[in-house]
Amino acid sequence: MAQLTIRDLYDLLSQAPRRRDLEQDVIRLVYDGTAIHLSTADQPDRVIARASTCGFVTGSWDVTAYTASLASVMAWMRMLDGENLIDLTPFWASAPIVLAFATGGQVGAWPVIACPTAPADRRPLLRADGLPPCPE
């Protein structure tokens, strides 16, 4: 999890490039314990924007996602107080992985394409016949 102000996260995400080709419209967010770095998936070493984190610190993570669903996340953040802290963390209870945004009891989510830092043993539970378990 990373904590930063809503304004800083909004400013970071607003710098994500918008391209016409959806398959190329992919960004990468990397949290290193002190900052979140934004780059494109096709040029991961070229940092476009950076936002320093504050408050609670946890282990690092790395996610890749389409920017197509970014507009709804940013619209949600515009309704919040920009000075408040927001928690940002990958969540992978089961597929698909999402990037969760939480502040003041409100939670938003953004679908993720890949999360290389997710534990490898986090897979949906399957029955012996390969189907998902039935609810009881």
Image: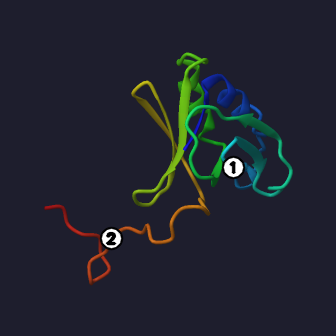
Dot 2 or dot 1: first in sequence order is: 1
Identify the residue at horizontal 75%, vertical 55% (top origin). Answer: 41
Residue 108 percent coordinates (x, y): 48, 35
Residue 30 percent coordinates (x, y): 69, 50
Instruction: Give the quadrant of the C terminus.
Output: bottom left
State left or right for residue 47 relative to residue 88: right
Identify the residue at horizontal 69%, vertical 49% (top origin). Answer: 32
Residue 20 percent coordinates (x, y): 77, 45
Residue 83's place in the image compared with 115, above or below, is above
Number of marks in picture: 2
Quarter assignment of residue 38: top right
Identify the residue at horizontal 32%, vertical 70% (top origin). Answer: 125
Helix, strand, or loop for circle 2? Answer: loop
Which residue in the protein does label 1 denote?
32
Near-viewer residue (123 or 26): 123
State left or right for residue 101 relative to residue 4: left
Asked if the residue under mark 1 is in contact with the one under mark 2, i.e. CB atoms within 8 Å, the reply is no
- Mark 2 residue type: Leu
**Could you give the CA–CA distance between mark 2 and mark 1, rounded to whole angstroms?**
31 Å
Near-viewer residue (47 or 64): 47
State left or right for residue 2 relative to residue 105: right
- Mark 1 residue type: Asp
Crowd rating for badge 2 (residues with CA inside 10 Å; few <14, some 14–19, many 20+): few
Crowd rating for badge 1 (residues with CA inside 10 Å; few <14, some 14–19, many 20+): some
Residue 81 percent coordinates (x, y): 55, 16
Check residue 125 in the rendering and tell me which mark sits there, or answer none. Answer: 2
Farthest residue, direction right: 46
Identify the residue at horizontal 56%, vertical 47% (top origin). Answer: 58
